[in-house]
Image: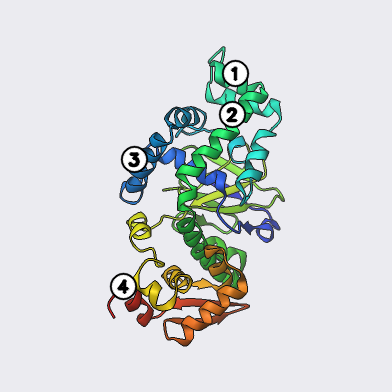
Amino acid sequence: MLRIHFGTEDLNRLRVAAGPDPLWETVHSLHLLQNRQAALVFDPWRREVRAALAKAGLTETVAALHRLCPWAEYFPDFLTPGQGIDDLETGIEQVLSVPIRRLGREIGHLYPGTRPLPPGARSLAGGDPRTLSGLGDALRRYHAVAVAPYAGEIRTVVAADRLVRADAALNAGPGGLLTSYQPDLAWRGDRLESAYPVAKELALEGRALTLIPSFFCVRSPVALADHELPPVLVHPLTPAPGWLARSRATDPAQLPVGQLIGPTRATVLDALERPLTTTQIGEALRITLSTASRHATVLRESGLVTSERRGSAVVHTRSRLGDALMDGRL
């Protein structure tokens, strides 16, 4: 059981990461390749990624990353240095600049009672520049094959989750925000509880807790092992089964609907399978806010989308007519 204890002002310091963290997604995807969790959801991804990694000649690279980041009760915190960093290169730069003492301590935890450490682990623990550079390259190459090709789906699911959290926080404050994470998390009024592979108590003591959504995290939330580091809690998003097939088979720009209303608007309409704000449409499709607003307006005026103001945001949802158009029922 994981218990996170909140002091009087800790609720007011809560923050939710603005988007997916590429290194947390990298770590969790590495874990998924070492287990069979959520087989219905992720087995198609596993098959596709394993084939792509073999084709790219990365089999040994991934094996080395698995040794450094095992699916186990412990993996090194330095691999996930950010509190919602949305840029891979910034995250890798932080990984490679971890103090040598911390590197040695965390890698030592991977090999308890083993002396001397295996050669590769020993050179990394000692901060060898060539080994560190190789780690950065391995993370980049793996991410390019196993995570980056799925960025669109990841951003869409994260954006939909953020809308739920924002609505909960606006309606019921920080306590309502934490309650919205049930059943993964249970809010007890002064502590947050979750199933966890080990017993873990974490007191915030005035530090801001960052909640980070993760596409490749499954079953239960994950916290850093070191209590002294800035606290984060990564929670699973649990995409729906068949997400990969849908993303492959329904590229809206290639469907007849794309020829009818244009590829960008078709992509917007496809993303609105889940309610999104104008800002979230822009983030998911990587278009400007003004462009997202213009496309949403055209779709609404065509009866394909409905829009509702919630506080300072406008939430867009695909209408029944929009569903019928995307499903090919017109």
Q: Which residue is mark 1?
A: 122
Q: Quick one: label 1 or label 4, which is nearer the N terminus? A: 1
Q: Which residue is mark 3?
A: 36
Whether residue 312 sits left or right of residue 248 in the image: it is right
Q: CA distance from mark 4 to mark 3?
A: 32 Å
Q: CA distance from mark 3 to mark 2?
A: 28 Å
Q: Quadrant of residue 226?
A: top right
Q: Nearer the viewer, mark 4 or mark 3?
A: 4
Q: Residues within 10 Å of mark 4 (few under 14, many from 20)?
A: few
Query: Which amino acid type is marked by label 1?
Result: Arg
Which of 252/81 is in front?
252
* Residue 255 drawn above or below residue 197: below
Q: CA distance from mark 1 to mark 3?
A: 30 Å
Query: Which amino acid type is marked by label 3?
Result: Arg
Q: Which residue is mark 2?
A: 134
Query: Which amino acid type is marked by label 4?
Result: Asp
In the rendered image, the quadrant that contains the C terminus is bottom left
Which of 186/276 is in front?
276
At horizontal 42% and vertical 78% (from top left) the residue drawn is 261
* Residue 85 drawn above or below residue 266: above
Which of 230/10 is in front?
230
Q: Quadrant of residue 13?
A: bottom right
Residue 327 numbered mark, or none: 4
